[in-house]
Amino acid sequence: MAASNWSTTLIMYLGRNSSTNYTTQCLFDIASFLRYAGTLTVILGLIGNCLSIIVFSRKVLRSRSCSMYFLALSVSDICVLIGYTVENLLFYGYGIQLLSNTYMCKLVIFLIYASTDISNYLLTLAAIDRCVLVSYRTAHYHFCRKSIAKLFIAMVVLVFSLINSHFLYGFHVDQQGACLPTSNEYIHFYVHHYDSYIDIIKTVLIPFLIIFVCNICIIIRLTRKQGFLSRTASTRRRRRRQEKDRQLTGFLLLTSILFIILSLPSEINDFLRTGFTHQFQIEYICQLWISTIIFIFLHQLNHASHFYVYTLSGPIFRKEFHKFLCQYRHPPRQQKSDFLDYSRRQSATSRHTHHDDVDEQRLSLFLKQTQSLGRVSHKPDF
């Protein structure tokens, strides 16, 4: 049985001075993998992140500072998935090129890098928030507040939008309609510096180290304070509050593990590929491209899976999600039945009131007739 080959067109940077489209035949059908696995991931990710926004916006959870970070993280994850869909999924999976427009080219590339950085550092802020809450009994009253969380979220969005703003002038659409860097100097900066060691340090290593240290501190403090928290939780309200904090900390730990496992391989792959020679990349282009697609898929899976992690690991999150699904199920029918019961009661009351009025009228008429007959019978004779 003969093996099938699938044609794949890739954009290759040939060093400092040029870039080109390179078409090759690969044994692995990359387009089919993206169409099925990639499309399913994007759809489930968009639905899940939208549901996460709704659940974290509910009154029970939105009062917590950590919930604000998870809420903003869901919005940022949606931006990552949209950028991935436009740049990779539609083009390599369906052959649809939307980046042939200059503004779309600049905006989508900027959106991918900026939203990825924002997501990672929002997760980092959530780790710091939980660490402060668990470790310091007094400082968390000033730091772990919803207003402070909103301020930090705005700062993260502003800072990383500025850091990645060079994509807005560094990319353009060439004569063939491909979205590429504008100049040879920018190609060298983008390939050998920014998308290599700068991106892996900024996007992965710094958040990873901060999250790792915070998680270690959280685990140690929770282990030591487990008995103390049980003794001090003397009231029902305090126990519920500590349970919410414990589950939000659980969300953070699981989400951090996913971030490390699913995001780090893609960044390492980008870093290693810059050191390969041009001849090596040509010889093993299919293997390199397949590994790159798989790593990108894992990276997107990280941004698409948070809702399902929350649902599986958090009873409070599941409870609020269930309330959201069921809140519109019974009230309309109940209101309708209440209205019908009220109408029946009103109708019955009206009938009884009507009969009572008729009886009173008849009794009054009878008394008047009796009185008139009495006056006639006692009339004196002259």
Image (cartoon, rainbow, N blue to C red):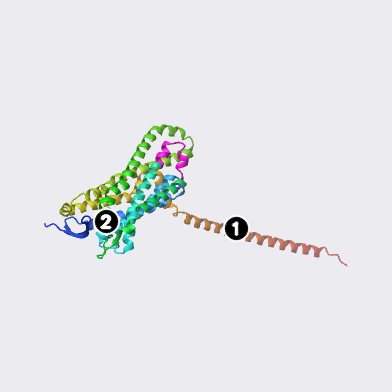
Q: Nearer the viewer, mark 1 or mark 2?
A: 2
Q: CA distance from mark 1 to mark 2?
A: 89 Å
- Disc 1 residue type? Thr
Q: Is residue 169 above or below residue 219?
A: below
Relative to the observer, which residue lies in front, 177 or 256?
177
Mark 2 neighbour class, 10 Å CA radius: few under 14, some 14 to 19, many 20 or more: few
Magenta stretch holds residue 134: yes
Name the image quarter holding residue 251.
top left
Mark 1 neighbour class, 10 Å CA radius: few under 14, some 14 to 19, many 20 or more: few
Q: Which residue is mark 1?
A: 349
Determine if residue 159 is in view.
yes
Residue sitting at the far bottom: 382
How far from the left and from the top, in percent, is residue 272?
22, 48
Relative to the observer, which residue lies in front, 85 or 166?
166
- What span is in magenta? 129-146
- Disc 2 residue type? Glu
Query: Quick check: marks 1 and 2 in contact, CB under 8 Å?
Result: no
Residue sitting at the far right: 382
Name the image quarter holding residue 97.
bottom left
Q: Which residue is mark 2?
A: 185
Relative to the observer, which residue lies in front, 295 or 234?
295
The residue at 60%/60% (across/down) is 350
Q: Callout 2: helix, strand or loop?
A: helix
How far from the left and from the top, in percent, is residue 376?
80, 65
